[in-house]
Image (spheres, rainbow, N blue to C red):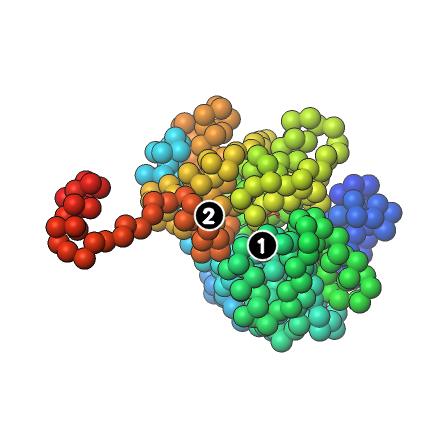
Amino acid sequence: MALDHLVRATCVRCGSHYGTQGLSTCPGCGIEGILDLEYDYDAVARTLTHESLRSRVGNQWRYLELLPVDGTREPPHPQVGMTPIYDVPRLAADVGVRALKLKDDGRNPTASFKDRASAVGVLKAREQGSDVIACASAGNAAASLAGFSAAMGLKSVIFVPERTPEPKVAQVLIFGGTVLRVKGSYDDAYAVCQDACARFGWYNRNCAVNPYLIEGKKTVGLELAEQLGEQLPDWVVLSVGDGCTLAGAWKGLWEMHRLGFISRLPRMLGVQAQGSAPLVDEFVRQEGSIRPVEARTLADSIAVGQPRNWRKALRAIRESRGAMLAVDDESILDAMRKTAQLAAVFTEPAGACAVAGLSRAVEQGIVGRDESALVVVTGNGLKDIRSATQASAQPINLPEDMAGLEQVLRARQLI
Ligand SMILES: *Cc1c(COP(=O)(O)O)cnc(C)c1O
């Protein structure tokens, strides 16, 4: 059913068109030639309406016409998407904008945004008859793929960099995934994974080269448009590693605009960590190429030194008249604490990076103090407790008597 609406795939580098099945990257451009799927929006608009949405499932499969999957197959059962959106006025005041909302994607089944893509990935693997699905991941895609493989009864093989936080590795293991720790960075893990998929014929979940997965990620944009309608804020803010997430969110918003669900589009603000900011660098230089870096940041989910989806991401920034900037690790930890204490959302550093970036954008006059914004919190804080502990106060060791307790409380001005 949904496959009927797919029209073609277009290479983001050379513009060549292809069919819509069995794709990876553009044969002419190789790894640089990431493909973008296009739908017959007039046909989609006939069945995807406010009216029809009212009676559909409360997860991302409600947008079936805009997903590249065979709608006759049973999707994985864990609830993906339709995550809550909160108004957070105290955090808004601290950041310096008129109004601020958070969309908490840490509420997805494996506690990150990546579930939107993995859910599509495991369905595509099944459609193509693969039993083994593989990916390279800084951590969240790994946990997510392992979870969704468990849901579908597939085997998952996951390549992670050495420094992946323990909770994410634990998630993969408990879901039964095979974890292969690669000596080196995410980029090293990525390279080994690509070679292994080619050699052993595994289904490749890497968002960079798999054009179907970004279609899952775009559901966050579809949801924002459906949930907020004309209340969409002036800016949508996301942290950026590879660039696929921001590009996906923009695609979803763009499609809902094309379908008439919203009458105007927000501007996109992409935020990177200073120690891993090749997209910000290219946003400033405008040279049409990317200069890879050795990624160094505690926000492990966005520590991508060699991004693959930079063309799609920078196109989204350009089309939306948006902006990009970078923030340092200290600001990220600071934003992590403030997001928890002023908005009651516990985010991992990558989500906090977007909050810190919004503050910086206000300071720099990119975002006006009279404007509104929404930050997508892309992952839950329990994913990286080391950073959470680093960002917060320490527990107090209590002496065993009341006098001791009073002394401690007085010192902290709690009594
Ligand atoms: C993957 C990820 C991102 C960034 O997505 P990219 O597609 O790499 O730009 C942001 N936050 C979290 C928590 C992630 O896991």
The amino acid at mark 2 is Ser
Q: Position of residue 131 (x, y in %)?
A: 71, 73
Q: Residue at x 20, y 40 (%)?
A: 411
Q: Position of residue 213 (x, y in %)?
A: 66, 56
**Residue 243 appears in the figure:** no
Amino acid at the residue labelled 1:
Thr
Does residue 297 appear in the picture of this structure?
Answer: yes
Q: Who's the residue at 39% across and 30% down the image?
A: 96
In the image, residue 70 lies at what x, y percent?
Answer: 67, 67
Q: Which residue is mark 1?
A: 164
> What kind of element bears circle 1?
loop
Q: Which residue is mark 2?
A: 387
Query: What kind of element bears circle 2?
Result: helix
Image height of 51 relative to 30, above or below:
below
Residue closest to the eye, 324 or 411? 411
The image quarter in which residue 200 lies = bottom right
